[in-house]
Image (cartoon, rainbow, N blue to C red):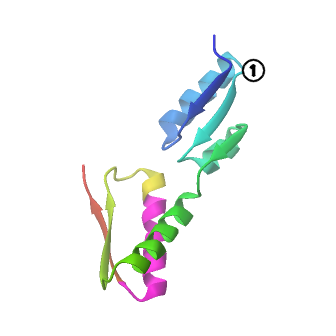
Amino acid sequence: GIDGLFVTIPDDVIVDAVSKCQELNPNVQILSINAGYEKSKELNLIHHVGMLEKDAGYQAGKKMAKFATFNKALCWNHIPGLNVLDDRCKGFEQAMNELGIKYLGQILVQ
């Protein structure tokens, strides 16, 4: 068996899998990384390493504007409907709006 699990939680399919793991072996210590902070709290995981998704997009937008000159921006979303990417794009949009940069929306790539 295992004693620990390191997982990212980008969508509910992973939530279901982690939940099943907890049911099968409640002693397994589970830590989430990168995506899924809110879900990690719901699952009562031991810790989450990463940023809140909207904050990550916001900070990325601010940093991008600091190092580049542009007046229009798009957010690339390679998995439309995936909440973590939608939230990151919302944060990016917020940063663009605050900076007076025209936000043209998301490019949805499938």
Q: Which residues are magenta?
A: 86-101
Does residue 67 lie above or below 28 as drawn? Answer: below
Q: Residue at x 51, y 69 (%)?
A: 59
How busy is the neighbourhood of tag 1: few (under 14 within 10 Å), some, or many (20 plus)?
few
Q: Residue at x 56, y 36 (%)?
A: 15
Apparent side of residue 17 relative to residue 41 in the rendered image (left or right): left
Q: Of helix, strand and loop, which mostly describes the magenta segment?
A: helix
The residue under label 1 is 27
Is residue 79 found inside the magenta-colored segment of the image? no
Q: Determine which quarter of the picture holds residue 101.
A: bottom left
Q: Residue at x 43, y 79 (%)?
A: 66
Q: Residue furthest left?
A: 110
Residue 35 location, x and y as percent? 53, 47
Is residue 98 found inside the magenta-colored segment of the image? yes
Q: Quadrant of the N terminus?
A: top right
Q: Nearer the viewer, residue 73 or 22?
A: 73
